[in-house]
Image: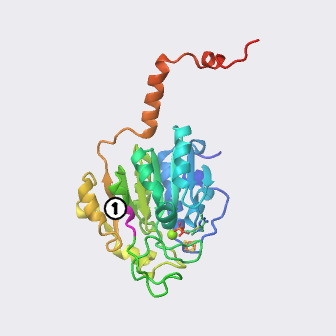
Amino acid sequence: MSGACNDPKTFKSDLKPIWCPGCGDFGVLQAVYRALAAIGRPTHEIAFISGIGCSSRIPGYTTVYGFNTVHGRALPIAQGLKTANPDLLVLVAGGDGDGFSIGGGHVPHAIRRNHDLTYIVMDNQIYGLTKGQLSPTTPKGETTVTSPYGSFEEPVNPLLYCLAYGAGYVAQGTPADLPGLTALIEEGLRYPGFAFINIQSPCVTYGDSEMQMKEQRAALRPLLAEGHDGSDRIKGMDLAQQYGRTLHTGVFYRNPTPPPTYDQLVRERQADQGKDQPDRRRALDRFAVRH
Ligand SMILES: Cc1ncc(C[n+]2csc(CCOP(=O)(O)OP(=O)(O)O)c2C)c(N)n1
Ligand code: SF4
Ligand SMILES: [Mg+2]
């Protein structure tokens, strides 16, 4: 590794992104570089885990440890990694399909365990990589290659989903507001516990024309400007109900008194048990073959 840890360029790999020109994920990548630089930890202390999808290519474009895993399985792998090495800063990424259809069953468990992970979902309301099928966040009535007559299905609300399961930090951003998105990712990384950031990242090839960068810029409704400070979970849930109708950005909820994380509890239990345990080498002696 070379370069200062507070320089965004330090986190940029030599791999050139193969996203379509104009894809929102380029902006998300810039926000990740800047947020990691603001945190200032060296690359070997950071791991970036993703699932499968256009968005899930993101770790490869950074210089931190990366694993582009299996569709819908970023969170289980990230939890295993964090448990094995709690000192790592672990960032998790994926798409709306990755996180809320095939991987949707993992989200509540990662939240209730309260691993100290930051999960960013590039929500473009479509399956981008596989060429434009309906995703769990596609709005009702939307025409896609798998809903030629308009979708009949109610979309999943990722914000309410994570708030309902008790995530301690829930926010929404967009690359249409890069400084705002950078601040949210940085804050998520600093939050001691499970942090979720839904990112309205436009798919320029298959996405809805109303959710492109220019349209988003015109529709932005920052939560702070609405007087929402993020400490009230119920008010956050109330605002989150407008997902898909109003483009709120900012923090819906930040637990003012974060409970202990899974990793902290594991360390406490290990320290507690270690007190009365025989020396590990002597414990292994019990299994040694004696002649
Ligand atoms: C087990 C499995 N099922 C299906 C696929 C095919 N597949 C790859 S990516 C993807 C959806 C991608 O959509 P999303 O997660 O929203 O990411 P995006 O490409 O939009 O960023 C699908 C269905 C796969 N790779 N593995
Ligand atoms: S298909 Fe959509 S999500 Fe995938 S790279 Fe192209 S613009 Fe981005
Ligand atoms: Mg998608």
Residue 189 or residue 176, whichever sits in front: 189
Q: Residue at x 45, y 49 (%)?
A: 110
Residue 112 or residue 28, whichever sits in front: 112
In this figure, which residue is indicated by the disc labeled 1?
160
Amino acid residing under circle 1: Leu
Helix, strand or loop under label 1: helix
Is 89 one of the magenta-colored residues? Answer: no
Locate residue 179: give its quadrant: bottom left
In x, y percent, where is residue 27?
Answer: 51, 65
Circle 1 Cα neighbour tier, 10 Å, few/some/many (<14 / 14–19 / ≥20): many
Q: Residue at x 35, y 53 (%)?
A: 165
In x, y percent, where is residue 232?
Answer: 24, 53
CB of residue at label 1: within 8 Å of ligand 1? no
> Would you say residue 67 is visible in this rendering?
yes
Q: In the displayed structure, does residue 226 sit left or right of residue 97?
A: left
Q: Residue at x 34, y 61 (%)?
A: 160
Residue 139 or residue 60, whichever sits in front: 139
Q: Which residues are magenta?
A: 156-160
In x, y percent, where is residue 109?
Answer: 44, 50
In x, y percent, where is residue 40?
Answer: 51, 44
Q: Quadrant of the N terminus?
A: top right
Q: Residue at x 24, y 56 (%)?
A: 234
Locate residue 155: give its quadrant: bottom left
Split into quadrants, the picture shows ligand 2 in the one at: bottom right
